Amino acid sequence: MIMRRNRVDSVQYSAAEKRQMMCSNLSFAASEAYKLLRTNVIFSMPGEHKCRVIGITSSMRGEGKSTTSINLSYSLAQTGKRVLTIEADMRLPTIYKVLRLSPSPGLSNLLVGLSSGTDITKDSGYMDNWKVITAGDIPPNPSELLGSENMRITIETYAKHFDFIVIDLPPVNAVSDALVVSKLTDGMIMVVRQDYSDKKSVLEAVSQFQFSDAKLLGFVLTCAGGEGKGYRRYGKYGKYGKYGKYYKSYGYGYGYESRPTLQKKEAGRSEAAKAPGAEKAPEQAAETGNKAQSEENRG
């Protein structure tokens, strides 16, 4: 197995390796653990006829939040529910790689008015009732886009057409994006990696959630079940306070993936260019959002 190591010598997995740890490739034990997580999520947010919006984050990079987002979405979709996964980590997106989807157009393109709702909604490749919105082109201002009125309108519009929306967010201690989006969710789940996360970082993340008045549903403990097992076992809600060996926090080095940025693409477009007319409700979010964005003199 090929493993990539970052500056703190912690194990990082490639997209190909992550595919062996998700959806239909999960072991029986891992699959059952995600079903338990699914049950806990459903019971923690009652409301049969209401779309439930769930944010997935972690205290630092490399704890398995994106993998958890994918597997939770897959498990929810297995029940026949309509599920939308939104890749809102615009700085270091990984979901599009794991699911082999086109990175753009995506969420960032919709929020700045360069794409419509139907342009960015993609099939997951697993089930017809599971859709995915990738991060899109990398913007210079992710936090501002996620905290914009366009983002609120987008979530409210898609909520009319899905039973669950799962949002993959950046680490809480790295950037403010997760805290900004938490106000639009019904609850947040924090992923904690065994023998990687440290108590101080988790406490700091929880403190930030409390300060932001966000609803923290619970924790998902990844890499549990024995040394050397990697991500092969997932999902149990970990009791707060039991975490493994401290490697070192990724801190504020959370940067950007080296892909063409949204700013560069915008520069090459004509100001007269307009998105195609909307026929479906998700496109109404783009049109309404564009109007709100122009009124705010977006940059």
Image (cartoon, rainbow, N blue to C red):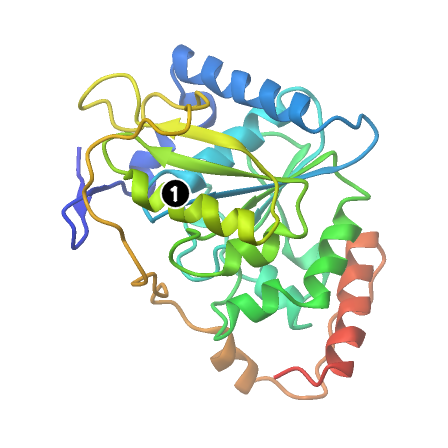
Residue 15 picture location, percent across and down: 33, 42
Element marked by disc 1:
helix
**Looking at the image, how many numbered discs can be counted on the residues?**
1
In the image, is 126 to the left or to the right of 92? Answer: right
In the image, is 270 to the left or to the right of 23? Answer: right
Residue 188 figure quarter: top right
Residue drawn at the location 48% of the way across and 61% of the way down: 176
Residue drawn at the location 37% of the way across and 38% of the way down: 64
In-front residue for pair 140/128: 140
In the image, is 170 to the left or to the right of 232? Answer: right
Residue 119 picture location, percent across and down: 67, 58
Q: Which residue is mark 1?
A: 203
Q: Quadrant of the N terminus?
A: top left
Residue drawn at the location 18% of the way across and 21% of the way down: 227
Residue drawn at the location 42% of the way across and 72% of the way down: 260
Residue 29 visible in the picture:
yes
In-front residue for pair 245/50: 245
Crowdedness near tag 1: few (<14), some (14–19) or many (≥20) residues, C-alpha within 10 Å:
some
Q: Quadrant of the C terminus?
A: bottom right
Which amino acid type is shown beneath numbered disc 1? Leu
Residue 275 picture location, percent across and down: 73, 72
Q: Is residue 259 above or below residue 88?
A: below
In the image, is 186 to the left or to the right of 176? Answer: right
Residue 286 figure quarter: bottom right
Residue 2 picture location, percent across and down: 17, 38
Q: Is residue 150 above or below residue 262?
A: above
In-front residue for pair 280/65: 65
Residue 100 visible in the picture:
no
